[in-house]
């Protein structure tokens, strides 16, 4: 039984990692690009730093911005999982376009509802790369609920993200920072 499970695990990683490879003159650098970076990106994608006490000293839940960035790294390796994770993120978007900063889909705790200037913009990058990887725009028509009620297509969620940023500018025309740690 153990040998069969080990073989299945090896086959899984062989298939997963075979979707991208680089040819580099440095063997260690190539191993990092071909194996360790995709492996670490996959783990971040799965856990979204959910168990990350060392990052802030608190339980952070699923961070919206971090998870959107993790999706970008997984798209070439597991497109269906990337699409599902992006739709999960979009369930944390309000009808006006802003999002919860982090949330707890497994624990069902209340999310951190603090508004940040960039969280809502990261799904645009992920959706763009999903469409590019898939070669079609069907994903943009899929329906996703808003956190505060109702639903819209992925495309409508993305448009609300841009609209929220455009409607919240400072006196010099730059996006407001809100509670962000970087912009």
Image: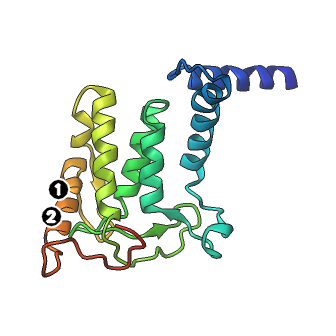
Q: Is residue 116 left or right of residue 135?
A: right
Q: Residues within 10 Å of mark 2 (few under 14, many from 20)?
A: some
Front-most of 17 and 25?
Answer: 25
Displayed quadrant of residue 174: bottom left
Front-most of 47 and 117?
Answer: 117
In the displayed structure, 81 sits above or below 102; it is above
Furthest toward the bottom, the residue is: 171
Q: Tell me if residue 1 can be seen.
A: no
Q: Position of residue 15 (x, y in %)?
A: 59, 20
Label 2 with label 1: CB-CB less than 8 Å: yes
Q: Residue at x 57, y 69 (%)?
A: 60
In the displayed structure, 25 sits above or below 150; it is above
Secondary structure, mark 1, is helix
Q: Residue at x 65, y 27 (%)?
A: 31
Q: Position of residue 113 (x, y in %)?
A: 40, 77
The residue singled out by tag 1 in the image is 159
Q: Tell me if residue 129 can be seen.
A: yes
- Name the quadrant of the C terminus: bottom left
Q: Is residue 118 left or right of residue 28?
A: left
Q: Residue at x 65, y 76 (%)?
A: 57
Q: Is residue 42 left or right of residue 114?
A: right
Secondary structure, mark 2, is helix
The residue singled out by tag 2 in the image is 163
Q: Residue at x 14, y 67 (%)?
A: 166
In the displayed structure, 96 sits above or below 87; it is below
């Amino acid at each position: 039984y153990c040998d069969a499970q080990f073989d299945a695990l090896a086959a899984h990683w062989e298939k997963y990692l075979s979707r991208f490879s680089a040819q580099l003159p440095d063997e260690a650098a190539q191993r990092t690009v071909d194996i360790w970076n995709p492996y670490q990106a996959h783990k971040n994608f799965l856990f979204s730093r959910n168990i990350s006490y060392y990052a802030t000293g608190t339980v952070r839940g699923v961070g919206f911005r971090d998870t959107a960035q993790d999706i970008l790294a997984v798209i070439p390796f597991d497109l269906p999982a990337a699409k599902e994770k992006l739709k999960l993120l979009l369930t944390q978007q309000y009808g006006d376009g802003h999002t919860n900063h982090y949330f707890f889909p497994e624990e069902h705790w209340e999310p951190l509802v603090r508004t940040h200037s960039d969280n809502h913009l990261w799904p645009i990058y992920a959706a763009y790369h999903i469409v590019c990887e898939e070669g079609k725009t069907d994903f943009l028509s899929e329906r996703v609920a808003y956190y505060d009620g109702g639903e819209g297509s992925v495309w409508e969620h993305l448009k609300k993200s841009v609209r929220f940023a455009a409607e919240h500018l400072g006196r010099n025309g730059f996006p407001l920072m809100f509670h962000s740690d970087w912009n």
